[in-house]
Image (cartoon, rainbow, N blue to C red):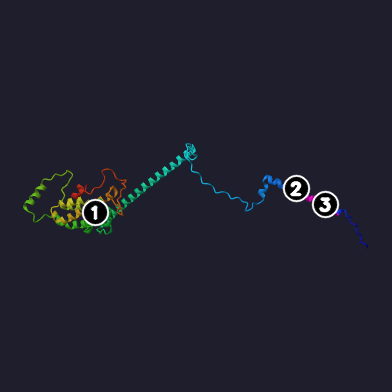
């Protein structure tokens, strides 16, 4: 077979090259026009990154000038608006409420500490009474009594401590009275004539109530025993002193009066723990200046013994 090749036209190659040059020239013109348009609208500066050397260093901010005195008020000194005034008033009101609440908390704290110190003092007095009734030594309770009550009731504290060194109980007084009953019921054999005459004359003229009955020595001893059981020590002493041979019970009467005195002292300490306004101290020796909620005018305890306590007689 024969290969047939068509002859190429020599005039077509230069023509195609000229068309390419024309298209490239038109594209160059369009690109230049586009760049000029972008530069005019500022798009070129946004699209192209800035060079390090071409960046401008921004100057440091200048310090604020000192305002010169002028008759015109600055913006900060302008009159406050109603909204600002209302907000300020609300803040001040809240601060006042907080201060009032803090003051109340402080007052309640002081009251609680004062009441706690009074309660502790009352418990110490109760513990001392229990030990006295049992005839036990006070041991550490004596130190607490001195610490808390010496400034307020020194004589009462001393009376309780001295009694604890030689204690007497109700059971002991009752047993001793029972042992003295036969001796107390008899008349004295060594009584003088004048003493017998006085005793007989005093027994002849006695003013009594219509409902009262003449008590025998045995009946008086029984009454004294009942008074001891009821802790009416003063009445028991009075009954024993009226017996014919009361001289035989002088030691018993002295011990009974000591017991009555220490009971009065303990009552005074308990009242002091509840009502003393100035001289009561706590466990650390600090003065309890918080007034007692139970205190009333004229009900404050004193260290002076009452008439009943000095005579050893309690009201019935």
Query: Residue visible at 39% across and 46% down?
Result: 102
Q: Say which label, 2 or 1, has the lower sequence index.
A: 2
Inspect this view and state whether residue 250 appears.
Answer: yes
Rendered image quadrant of residue 176 = bottom left
Residue 234 placed where, x, y %? 20, 50
Q: Verify whether residue 264 appears in magenta.
A: no
- Can residue 230 be seen here? The reply is no
Q: Crowdedness of circle 2 by 10 Å Cα count: few (<14), some, many (20+)?
A: few
Residue 105 x %, y %: 38, 47
Question: Could you tell me which residue is drawn at 18 percent across and 52 percent down?
Answer: 237
Measure the C-alpha gap from mark 2 to mark 1. Answer: 119 Å
Judging from the image, what secondary structure is the residue with disc 3 in? helix
Decide if residue 71 is on the left or right side of residue 221: right
| Mark sitting earlier along the chain (3/1) | 3
Residue indicated by mark 2: 30
**Residue at numbered disc 1:** 157
Element on which disc 1 rests: helix
Residue extent of the magenta highlight: 13-32
């Amino acid at each position: 077979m024969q290969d047939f090749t068509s002859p190429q036209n020599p005039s077509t190659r230069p023509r195609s090259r000229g068309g390419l040059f024309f298209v490239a020239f038109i594209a160059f013109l369009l690109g230049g026009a586009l760049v000029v348009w972008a530069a005019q609208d500022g798009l070129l500066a946004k699209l192209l990154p800035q060079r390090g050397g071409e960046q401008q260093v921004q100057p440091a901010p200048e310090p604020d000038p000192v305002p010169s005195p002028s008759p015109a008020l600055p913006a900060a000194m302008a009159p406050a608006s109603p909204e600002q005034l209302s907000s300020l008033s609300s803040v001040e009101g809240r601060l006042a409420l907080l201060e009032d609440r803090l003051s109340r908390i402080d007052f309640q704290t002081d009251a609680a500490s004062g009441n706690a110190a009074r309660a502790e003092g009352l418990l110490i007095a109760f513990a001392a009474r229990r030990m006295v009734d049992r005839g036990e030594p006070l041991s550490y309770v004596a130190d607490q009594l001195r610490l808390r009550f010496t400034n307020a009731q020194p004589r009462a504290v001393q009376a309780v401590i001295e009694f604890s060194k030689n204690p007497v109980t109700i059971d002991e007084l009752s047993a001793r009275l029972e042992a003295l009953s036969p001796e107390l019921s008899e008349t004295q054999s060594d009584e003088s004539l004048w003493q017998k005459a006085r005793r007989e004359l005093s027994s002849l003229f006695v003013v009594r109530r219509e409902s009262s009955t003449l008590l025998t020595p045995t009946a008086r001893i029984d009454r004294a025993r009942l008074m001891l059981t009821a802790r009416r020590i003063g009445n028991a002493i009075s009954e024993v002193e009226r017996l014919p041979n009361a001289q035989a019970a002088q030691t018993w009467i002295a011990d009974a009066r000591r017991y009555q005195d220490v009971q009065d002292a303990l009552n005074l300490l308990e009242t002091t723990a509840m009502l003393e306004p100035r001289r009561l101290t706590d466990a650390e020796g600090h003065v309890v200046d918080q007034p007692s909620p139970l205190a009333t005018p004229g009900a404050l305890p004193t260290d002076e013994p009452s008439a009943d306590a000095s005579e050893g007689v309690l009201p019935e």
